[in-house]
Image (cartoon, grey):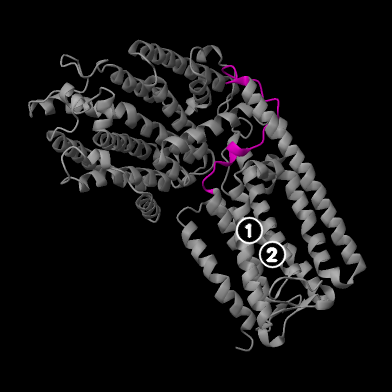
């Protein structure tokens, strides 16, 4: 084993976790992730080589000749250089896996005096302003406390280095890492404090603990040796010197803070299209990154950040399938898709939660007028500014009469790049819902879904339109990235048409699953002419959704859905890859289609119960998700 002992430590203990994490992240990894990892690898290697060489030359640590292959750079064994890379890479992967669950722009800091509202009065202004103020004060206190602590540790490190002796190793660690951590803390402390704590602590603590164990084994075997004259000879446990424990902790803090600083500036670049007008490349230049970090927090559009936070909360709380799939999208595309989802969900809730049909109709009328006004206002603003992306003006009048959450989501909807007819048809789907009898149990009630064409028309309105808007955003962002050219427009239109059909299929699956749930609301989406074949009426289904014939009709709806799905699934592979669009759409579709597969598997179950039982377990959903991403 002579000459390979040092290398064997890394082969046995650092390569396997790096390989496992690579496999876990591979389906989710984007070009931006590659940019962040590559950038940090370069920084880590360049910054660590001079410092580590100095340690070796000062005899702070050493290694027996028998333990290394023999090749060195500035006295540093090549195995050690490799470790610089593998630790940075592994910790970065842990961070990226955890961070996939969040939309970075939603966690940007906000000053206590938010920007003036651009379309409606602040939602619950007292509570919202108070929350922002408290958030800012906590961040300010934490920044000062953290800064003071870091300055103190740097001063302690400098004193230890100056005195020499047993404090040399710890002092060199503190004066080398402390200033960099302080710099990153000064740049991004508010963002670091704003993101979920797991996004900060897990990438720091998990790799640190693992490397403590590995280092303990190496020190026990004498693979490398800490000079007892340059260390305090205090052991964290067993053979692990306290200096080594601190080294792995601070280096993982450096890596994680570096990733957070990248996400901070990318959150600004992608989140504020009214400031950065052009598409942000996956590998942004240093100048662009500096511009992003140079925007003062006071200039962040607070209302947009708050609105995005609400949109993310709505997404996470209402749709497990799309929430999971949204982690694949990145940049501005992910933000716009989240805002689109929030508007559609808020609009749907606004109608469904009305106490009477009259109130629902009035709400729908107000929403329809607000949509028309918002589109007209945005078009005018775009023409005036001649900008590619939207600007945010004052649309208070156009939002009059809407609940605050609906108004806020409409205000931030990218109306200048969405087809107006799709939103209007979405509202027409809500109108069809309002045509159902107030009391669905009345046999003389008029139910709007009379034919298969009505079923498909309704499914287009409430789901096909959403698919059309989603794909419109996909192709626009891809065009902005130069992935798409004008000659691809016809192919894009074909994909959007296929996406509309796919939306119809997914809505049919939703209808097939929720027959009993819809019946409880007085609704029946099974075509009346189908029911007549069994001498049934929609009112009878509303009264008893577990009639034996319902299972046969459920399968009939599912067959239509699956036929449409199979005819159009190939279009997914023609979608742009930009922003994770192809993978994200595939993952979202497959997760929803899996509900249909579960229903079909239950075809032989007791009549009328399949829909109630059609849930996709978490493990199965994750498997479908992973399989969709690996294609």
- Which segment did they paint magenta? 100-125
Is residue 118 covered in magenta? Answer: yes
Q: CA distance from mark 2 to mark 1?
A: 10 Å
- In this rendered view, identify the residue nearer to me: 72 or 326: 326
Of the 4 image quadrants, the one containing the N terminus is: bottom right
Tell me if I can see residue 296 in this picture: no
Q: Of the two numbered discs 2 and 1 on the same chain, state the one appearing first in sequence.
A: 1
Q: Residue furthest right?
A: 163
Mark 1, Cα crowd under 10 Å, few <14 / some 14-19 / many 20+, is some
Residue 155, given in percent of the width and then of the height, sits at 87, 56
Residue at 80% across, 61% down: 174
Of the 4 image quadrants, the one containing the C terminus is: bottom left
| As drawn, 340 above or below 45 | above
Residue 185, given in percent of the width and then of the height, sits at 74, 47
Task: Choose mark 2 or mark 1, whichever is in front.
Answer: 1
Side of 47 where 398 appears, left or right: left
Residue 428, given in percent of the width and then of the height, sits at 33, 20
- In this rendered view, identify the residue nearer to me: 121 or 281: 121
**What kind of element bears circle 2?**
helix
Q: Which mark is residue 248?
A: 2
Side of 238 where 354 appears, left or right: left
Residue at 92% across, 67% down: 163
- In this rendered view, identify the residue nearer to me: 289 or 441: 441
Q: Which mark is residue 476?
A: none
Badge 1 is on which residue? 205
User: Magenta part mainly helix, strand or loop?
Assistant: loop
């Amino acid at each position: 084993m002579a000459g390979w002992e040092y290398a064997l430590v890394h082969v046995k203990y650092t390569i396997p976790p790096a390989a496992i994490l690579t496999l876990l992240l591979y389906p989710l990894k984007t070009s931006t992730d590659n940019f962040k990892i590559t950038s940090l690898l370069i920084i880590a290697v360049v910054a660590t080589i001079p410092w580590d060489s100095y340690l070796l030359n000062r005899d702070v640590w050493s290694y027996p000749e028998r333990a290394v292959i023999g090749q060195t750079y500035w006295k540093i064994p090549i195995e050690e250089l490799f470790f610089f890379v593998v630790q940075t890479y592994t910790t970065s992967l842990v961070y990226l896996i955890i961070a996939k669950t969040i939309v970075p722009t939603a966690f940007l800091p906000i000053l206590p005096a938010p920007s003036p509202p651009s379309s409606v009065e602040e939602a619950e202004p007292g509570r919202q302003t108070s929350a922002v103020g408290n958030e800012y004060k906590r961040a300010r206190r934490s920044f000062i406390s953290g800064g003071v602590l870091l300055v103190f540790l740097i001063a302690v490190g400098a004193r230890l280095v100056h005195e020499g002796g047993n404090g040399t190793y710890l002092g060199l660690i503190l004066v080398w890492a402390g200033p960099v951590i302080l710099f990153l803390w000064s740049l991004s402390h508010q963002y670091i404090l704003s993101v979920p704590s797991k996004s900060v602590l897990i990438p720091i603590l998990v790799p640190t603990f693992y490397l403590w164990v590995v280092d303990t084994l190496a020190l026990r075997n004498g693979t490398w040796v800490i000079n007892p004259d340059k260390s305090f000879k205090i052991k964290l446990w067993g053979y692990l010197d306290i200096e080594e424990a601190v080294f792995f902790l601070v280096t993982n803090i450096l890596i994680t803070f570096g990733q957070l600083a990248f996400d901070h500036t990318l959150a600004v670049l992608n989140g504020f299209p009214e400031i950065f007008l052009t598409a942000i490349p996956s590998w942004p230049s240093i100048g662009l990154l500096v511009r992003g970090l140079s925007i003062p927090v006071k200039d962040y559009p607070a209302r947009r950040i708050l609105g995005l936070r609400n949109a993310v909360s709505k997404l996470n709380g209402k749709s497990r399938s799309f929430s999971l799939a949204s982690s694949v999208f990145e940049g501005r595309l992910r933000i716009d898709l989240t805002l689109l989802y929030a508007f559609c969900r808020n609009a749907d809730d606004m109608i469904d939660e009305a106490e009477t049909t009259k109130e629902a109709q009035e709400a729908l009328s107000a929403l329809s007028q607000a949509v028309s006004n918002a589109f007209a206002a945005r078009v005018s603003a775009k023409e005036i500014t001649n900008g590619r992306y939207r600007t945010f003006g004052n649309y208070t009048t156009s939002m009059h009469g809407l609940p605050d959450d609906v108004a806020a989501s409409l205000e931030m909807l990218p109306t200048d790049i969405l087809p107006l007819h799709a939103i209007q048809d979405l509202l027409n789907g809500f109108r069809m819902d309002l045509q159902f009898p107030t009391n669905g149990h009345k046999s003389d009630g008029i139910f709007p879904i009379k034919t298969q064409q009505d079923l498909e028309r309704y499914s287009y309105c409430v789901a096909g339109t959403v698919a059309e808007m989603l794909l419109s955003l996909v192709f626009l962002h891809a065009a902005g990235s130069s992935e798409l050219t004008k000659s691809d427009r016809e192919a894009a239109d074909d994909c959007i048409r296929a996406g509309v059909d796919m939306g119809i299929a997914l809505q049919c699956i939703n209808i097939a699953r929720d027959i009993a749930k819809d019946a409880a609301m007085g609704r029946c989406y099974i075509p009346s002419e189908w029911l007549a074949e069994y001498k049934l009426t929609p009112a009878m289904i509303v009264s008893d959704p577990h009639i034996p014939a319902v299972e046969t009709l459920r399968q009939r709806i599912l067959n239509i859905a699956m036929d449409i799905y199979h005819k159009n699934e190939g279009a997914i592979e023609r979608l742009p890859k930009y922003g994770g669009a192809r993978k994200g759409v595939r993952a979202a579709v497959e997760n929803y289609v899996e509900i249909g597969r579960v229903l079909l598997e239950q075809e032989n179950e007791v009549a009328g119960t399949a829909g109630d039982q059609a849930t996709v377990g978490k493990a199965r959903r994750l498997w479908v998700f992973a399989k969709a991403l690996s294609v």
